[in-house]
Amino acid sequence: MPEITYREAVRDAMSEAMRRDGDVFIMGEDIAEMGGSMGVTQGMLQEFGPERVRNTPISEMAIVGAGVGAAMAGMRPIVEIMYQDFTTLAMEQLVNQAAKHRYMSGGQLKVPLTVRTQGGAGWSPGAQHAQQLEAWFVHVPGLKVVFPSTPEDVRGLLFRSIYDDNPVVFFEHRTLYGIKGEVPAELEPIELGQGRIHREGEDVTVVATGRLVHEALAAAADAEKEGVSVEVFDPRTLLPLDEEGLVSSVKKTNRCVVAHEAIVRMGFGAEVAALVQERAFDYLDAPVERVGARFSPLPFAPVMEAYVIPHEEDVLAAIKRTVGRNGNG
Amino acid sequence: MATAEKTSKGLSPDTLKEFLREMLLIRRFEEKVEERFRAGELPGFLHVAIGQEAVAVGVCRALEDDDIIASTHRAHGHTLAKGTHPNALMAELYGKVEGCSRGYGGSMHLYDVENGNMGANAVVGGGLPAIVGAALAYKLRGEPRVALAFFGDGATNIGTFHEALNLAQLWKVPAVFVCENNHYAESTPAHQQLPIEDLTKRAEAFGMTAMTVDGQDVEAVYRTALEATSHAREGRGPVFLLAETFRLTGHYIGDPQVYRPKEEIRELRRTQDPLDRLRATLDVPDDEWDAMEREIAELVDGSVEFAKNGTDPEPQDALKNIYAE
């Protein structure tokens, strides 16, 4: 199996869809000659031309809304929002328009739109360029939300998302663009709503997303040295969520830690904790532990940023707290 | 529409009588909606288009069947003019399965995709970017279609208007932006919300072709709209079409209109009723007018009957149509 970067995997999924299907095109800020601020679309202008790799003005409302309209008119547009902080500018179009046209029309319309965006801290951009806002979108019926953590997953899930007949908000993590991983020689779409067990274990399940999947895997390796067996479950898509996969893992290990880079309070982990107590309460030997960012905007100074966002040691500490308890309290 | 004569010459009296009939249908439909709302039969929040019928009819008559529109919270007139049967529209207002949005939308979210209505929008300016995108799709596929947005003067203050017009002009997509300037954003008069008087300047700032028309003169609206859609369809870029019109009623049904003098409405009803103006031009004899009234009354009464006999959705159907399979 070939090894490619997460960045190459994103590009590969889009390019393959665009080669196969004239209805697929991409628009966004600085994606043409510059190849995107993260370099994801490099080379795509040369292959597909300016009609299908469309540089846009800095107009998030109009870009997303144009994607909605093109999708309703039968295209499969991909919109790149440079930083997920800027999705806030397009919230009206995403929440009131993209998510609701099918519903409000009583099923007459479909909106096969993919909105790709990226974020993630660890490089000190400050408060407006690295937030993790996925929880905002999983609250909206009509949207699908995907957040892959590996090259294989990002390629298969993005390809599948482009062909989904619903609006998909597709989160990429900035600090993962450079990681390498094996991918199948032939692009294989991955169905939305299927989690992935990255590592099997017996004592505790860590449900992790994005960068925290990798932090959780590192924490699991350390925990193993201390005799704790950790299962790492990546839901990969947050909406729809692989509830069965997640709950059955927790029923097996009897403990659950949920870890994401986003702020803990009202984050995606809160929903996971609620789901686990609803469906696996009698199996739990310890309260669900949540790992995530502190309730703070992202600060600039590197030492403060590192303090706010979660790392491997935070996951490890949460694992230890759960295994430090047993079913008898 | 096939029946209209698409020439630059004067429209025949027969064609104008068809326009008059459509405008009368909208007027009587809206009056019936007011009546049934006040009788407590219609749920929700309703905005009628009384006074603005000529814009809806003149513009939609200039469209081809596979052109599309996006409408606003004041959508009944556009929807009827774009070809939705009054039964399907009234059934929607009653929340029935037979409604044009299957009971999922309501007055502010009227859809009829088969007839090219891609949705009325309850967010002011919310539908404009999608019109740019649909027009882009037509351009990319080489289809000679036009995507057209209706919106009001109030919408020219919102960000989507400026971003959408900028993008449309930049990409020269076949879009037409029809601004129905009824001089009030809900209750707020122009002088409290618009620092300029001539709204075409806003479009011209993007380099966009702009046209202005008397929105109470249906023939003028039709001609100008045809010019605008032809311009867009021929690949010469989008057009901003400003229709000066008047809302001869409140913003919503029940609006006490404390923000404008009663004399203003009386005067507008006397001088700016688009039906009166067309009827006077055509010199329609009383017996012909009465026959038209009877036919329309039957149609509108029939739509209420149809709607009342319609099917209530099952409550749990609320959980359908959230996602496409």
Image (cartoon, coloured by chain):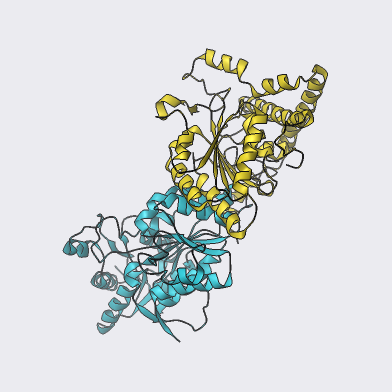
Chain colours: A cyan, B yellow
The answer to whether residue A195 is seen in the rendering is: no
User: Which image quadrant for residue B306?
Assistant: top right
In this rendering, the answer to whether B287 lies above or below A111 is above
**Foreground: B35 or B196?**
B196
**Foreground: B287 or A254?**
B287
Please name the residue shown 59% across and 34% down the image. Answer: B43
Residue B102 lies left or right of residue B246; in this view the side is right
Q: Furthest-top residue in view?
A: B263
User: Which image quadrant for residue A317?
Assistant: bottom left
Q: Furthest-front residue in view?
A: B9
In this rendering, the answer to whether B280 lies above or below A27 is above
Question: Which quarter shows the C terminus of chain B?
Answer: bottom right
The x, y position of residue A107, in whole percent, is 62, 52
The x, y position of residue A255, in whole percent, is 35, 71
User: Which image quadrant for residue B42?
Assistant: top right
The answer to whether residue B233 is seen in the rendering is: yes
Residue B23 lies left or right of residue A53; in this view the side is right
Question: Which quarter shows the N terminus of chain B?
Answer: top right
The x, y position of residue B215, in whole percent, is 60, 29
The x, y position of residue A128, in whole percent, is 29, 55
**Foreground: A257 or B39?**
B39
Residue A56 lies left or right of residue A16; in this view the side is left
The number of numbered badges drawn on the structure is 0
